[in-house]
Amino acid sequence: MSDLYGLIDKTVTQLGYELVDLEVSNRGKLLRLFIDKPEGITIDDCVLVSNQLGNVLAVENDIDYDRLEVSSPGLDRVLKKEADFMKFVDAKASIKLRMPMEGRKNFVGVLKGLVDGNVSIEVEGALVVVPFSNIDKARLVPEF
């Protein structure tokens, strides 16, 4: 899986995009990836990446898949990498923890950054510091 992730990440990055997330499901037969760039993603971007990855994966004989889906991360973009928590400072986010802190596993608030492997999020006026390693899932929360 790490070889597949590395191959896809390298290809996407060379095309000028960021690989936000990769999902492999249906016993590896479905590859779903989410890409981004600062000005946002269009359908043409998805087609370009899909075509390029289709060619790259065809050359790699040991990668067997039936369907490849390329999409934008959406307004509720997943936050996976440490860099994501710095990139989206002052954005509203929801964080689900692996192990509870202060009797809670879910926090919704405004991201305040990442320092020394700890994510800071302002929740109901209080600053909560969460070890990055304790984060199970995190997403942006769209505000309208």
Image (tube, rainbow, N blue to C red):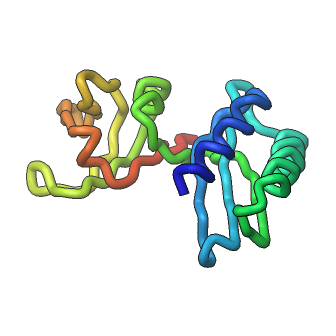
In the depicted structure, whether residue 48 falls above or below residue 22? above
**21 horizontally vs 119: left or right:** right
User: Residue at horizontal 18%, vertical 33%?
Assistant: 126
- Image coordinates of residue 71 in percent, x first then y, are 73, 51
User: Residue at horizontal 76%, vertical 59%?
Assistant: 69
Taking depth in this image into account, of 46 and 74 the one nearest to the observer is: 46
User: Residue at horizontal 62%, vertical 77%?
Assistant: 26
Residue farthest to the left, as pictured:
102
- Image coordinates of residue 130 in percent, x first then y, are 21, 39
User: Residue at horizontal 60%, vertical 64%?
Assistant: 24
Residue 43 visible: no
- Image coordinates of residue 84 in percent, x first then y, are 47, 32
Which quarter of the figure has residue 103?
bottom left
Which quarter of the figure has residue 82?
top left
Residue farthest to the bottom, as pictured:
26
**70 horizontally vs 78: left or right:** right
Assign the N terminus to one quadrant of the image: bottom right
**130 horizontally vs 3: left or right:** left
